[in-house]
Amino acid sequence: MSDEPFLRNLWYFGERSSALKAGRLRRVMLLGEPVMLGRGEDGAAFALRDICPHRGVPLTAGRIVGDGTVECPYHGWRFRTDGVCSHIPSLVGGETVDPAKIRVRSYPVREQNGLVWVYMAAPGKEAAAPATEPPNVGVPDARPRWMESQTFHCGIDHAVIGLMDPAHAPYVHAHWWWHVKPREKAKAYASLPNGFVMTRHAPTKQAYKLLGTDVSTEITFELPSTRFENIEGTILGKAAKVVGLTVCTPRDADTTEVTQFFYWPAWLGFIRPFFMVLGPVFLGDDRRIVELQREGLKFNPSLMLIQDADQPAIWYHRLKKAWAESTVSGTAFVNPVQARTLRWRS
Ligand code: FES
Ligand SMILES: [Fe+2]
């Protein structure tokens, strides 16, 4: 694997659509790079590197001007949303410098399901069109009904593995009001284009009863760090679908933003208080344990991954390796995950 800690040629979650107002600029760190997210008066979101190519001032400190370009606050250079410089105020004519030949890096952006995604291309591949699509909730007119975001002081790998780890729940989430007696589980897993899925099954947790009778769920994971839980049930004779989406956004090598969204149809609004109360608690549990883990990782110990409970983590590492190799070699990604049933107690 290369030394690059982040996977490239993939979409990363940038911001909620509602947080990106027209005419406004926002700075986010993605994969160690300062990225400016903006939305023009025409409503279209865009992303540029948040460093002016003239003398390095963050462009987010500037503003969107009348012609829809971003104006740097230092010398007023203007950049179109595709990154090309459109105006250098100091030029009087007759100079050899051609603004159109100057550009700030632009990133492909897609907006769907109320979320803005940013495509982080591999070095040297910035000009190529994205070969993949960002994660899709798969529900018509989906918009997030609830979200919780927390900053984990750990690299992306431990954040991702902590979220897919099936054996931690009885310990990390051991609240007296939530505790369930660990029992043996057997779950079928299959591969997905860029990851794997715990196939549809009846969940054992009582909380799922909130979604009525015959509740079933499937949980997916796909690179770089997207987890979907697709829950289906029947409430008052009506089919209900609730989708949980968790994304881990690497801010830098040691900081990962973990964000959870839930989507449900408007008529299911009465389940919202449940998420408002429990969501921050559970995500906080996961955050605290990886921060505790950091105390041990400081000493660079060798770690273990055991069968079967750590198999999702093993798959994650294999998926990453295969993706990184395909990015470097330019060959097609081959998913290393084979379908199998995993058994553990939790
Ligand atoms: S630093 Fe941006 S215009 Fe000079
Ligand atoms: Fe957890």
Image (spheres, helix red, strand yellow):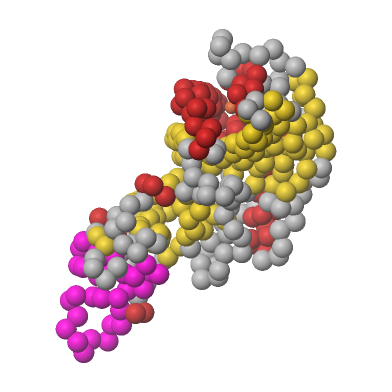
**90 sits to left or right of 26:** left
Residue at screen point 26% across, 71% down: 67
Q: Using the image, determine if residue 253 lies above or below residue 72.
A: above
Camera sees residue 183: yes
Q: Quadrant of the C terminus?
A: top right
**21 sits to left or right of 311:** left
**190 sits to left or right of 321:** right
Q: Specify the quadrant of the image occupied by residue 228.
A: top right
Q: Which residues are magenta?
A: 70-99
Rendered location of residue 295, percent (x, y): 51, 25
Residue at screen point 71% across, 22% down: 204
Residue at screen point 41% across, 66% down: 105
Rendered location of residue 161, percent (x, y): 62, 35
Rendered location of residue 169, percent (x, y): 63, 22
Main secondary structure type of the part rendered in magenta:
loop
Q: Specify the quadrant of the image occupied by residue 91.
A: bottom left
Pick the front one: 286 or 242: 242
Residue at screen point 80% across, 35% down: 188
Count the marks.
0
Q: Residue furthest front?
A: 237
Rendered location of residue 244, percent (x, y): 57, 37
Q: Residue furthest top?
A: 176
Q: Using the image, determine if residue 27 lies above or below residue 256.
A: below
Q: Please check the rendered image and state whether residue 73 is part of the magenta-colored stretch, yes or no.
A: yes
Image region (quadrant) for ligand 2: top right
Q: Residue furthest bottom?
A: 94
Pick the front one: 299 or 101: 101
**26 sits to left or right of 174:** left
